[in-house]
Image: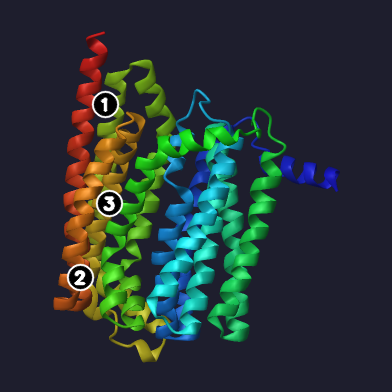
Amino acid sequence: MSHILSRWSALLMGAGPHREKQNIVWNMIGSFCYASASMVLAFLVMRIAGEEQGGIFAFGYSTLGQQMFIVAYFGLRPFQITDGRGEYRFGDYLHHRFLTCAAAVLCGAAYLLLSGYAPEKTAAVFLLVCYKVIDGLADVYESEFQRQGHLHLTGKSNTFRTLLSVTVFLTVLTASRSLPAACAAAVAAQIAGVLLFDAVVIRRMPFVDRNWNRKRMGPLTGAASLLFVSVFLDFYIFSAAKYAIDAHMDDAASGYFNMIFMPTSVINLAAGFVIRPVLTWLTGSWTEGDFAGFKRMLVRISGLIGALSLLAVGLAWFLGRPVLGIMETVLGNAYAGSLVRYHVPFTAVVLGGGFYALLNLYYYVLVILRRQKTIFGIYAVMTALAAVLAPVMVRRSGIFGAAYAYLALMAVMAAGFAGCGWLAVAGGERAAAGK
């Protein structure tokens, strides 16, 4: 058995003499598979099981499930992959993740107990929470792969785990027409994927210290606590419109809003292609004092994200109606006219997604500069704004109001992050010059 696992690990780890190229290629493939899974699944659940089940899935997978993923994730990925000096061992990060995953499951269960949902919706959403929490566990392995310079393993894990769990989910859903049964099967497949593509592989990687110290859990929690709260609030702000729809409209409305919200995944995917590969480079440049190179790269990446966002908005405006019409056709005759009427909100969501991609870049800049308090301050202000703005606009204008609330929140938050990011860079440069 050990021999088989060794050969399996060697097969996955093999990158040949062109590791950097493999890192880029597999990161793109993995990011595409991971991001597209949400879109494909939400679409197919609506077609196979109907708009109500589609809305339940969309909320459980993309909203509450993702929020609990954030609890499991604890904001540690950027901290871990930029921990170039080895302040904490992989074993420390792993055992800390066990604790946060348990907390995420308990938080999800508590939310559902207080929600008043019907039993079938409660079961499906809880299983989707478990699915996303396992995603959070996989992230600690994938972050370590990236820290060790093996981003291609992160991409492979994302790709193969996603394909395995999505295939199992859709097979069971098609055969049973039961959303809870399909979610349970997906959870089992997700567990198998983490074992096969993460846990087995990392045990056979050199230079990965799997030892851990219980006394390190407190300092690690403290080091990442502001990042965690910030990321948790970030996703709440990002999803405030979805929470408002779940609270003030029906499950079908959640499904429809999720349909027009899909482009944000594509924009974030494209931004990830641009941002992820340069994070270690930006970290190294800042650490080594190459401030001019750091700023040049930051301007270049900002410009690229801006150009891609403008292109996406243009395509959404001119091609949005035909695309939404095609989606209606594929969903079936029962959905005729249900999406095309949301062409303007669709375009607004795309523009909001562009702002979100830009603010993510400057979020990482502030993480590299270790400005956790600044990050937290921005999110605290935006959370208060989101908690008021999204429910009010959804009650007044339904899905239209949700889209405009999302756009407004993303634009204000992007301005805050970009402004604080450049101020932090200037301040860091002055501090270094004064030494």
Crowd tier of the residue under label 1, counting other residues whose Cα lies within 10 Å: few below 14, some 14–19, many 20 or above: some
In the rendered image, the residue lying farthest to the bottom is 334
Seen from the viewer's position, the closer of residues 84 and 282 is 84
Label 1 SS: helix
> Which quadrant holds the C terminus?
top left
Label 3 SS: helix
Query: Which residue is at a point 27% across and 57% down the rendered structure image?
Result: 237
Whole-Å distance between the Cαs marked 3 and 1?
20 Å
Q: Which residue is mark 1?
A: 295
Q: Which residue is mark 3?
A: 356
- Residue 317 visible? The answer is no
Q: Which residue is mark 2?
A: 391
Seen from the viewer's position, the closer of residues 97 and 235 is 97
106 up-or-down from 429: above or below: below
Q: Which mark is nearer the camera, 3 or 1?
A: 3
Where residue 397 sits, quadrant-wise, is bottom left
Q: Position of residue 251 (x, y in %)?
A: 36, 81
Query: Which residue is at a point 50% across and 83% down the rendered structure image?
Result: 120
- Whether label 3 touches label 1, CB < 8 Å: no
Label 2 SS: helix
Q: Which mark is nearer the camera, 2 or 1?
A: 2
**Amino acid identity at mark 2:** Pro
Q: How is the image coloured?
A: rainbow
Q: Position of residue 425 (x, y in %)?
A: 24, 26
**Amino acid identity at mark 3:** Tyr
- Whether label 2 touches label 1, CB < 8 Å: no
Whole-Å distance between the Cαs marked 2 and 3?
20 Å
Q: Is residue 3 left or right of residue 340?
A: right
**Amino acid identity at mark 1:** Lys
Whole-Å distance between the Cαs marked 2 and 1?
39 Å
Q: Earlier in the sequence, mark 3 or mark 1?
A: 1
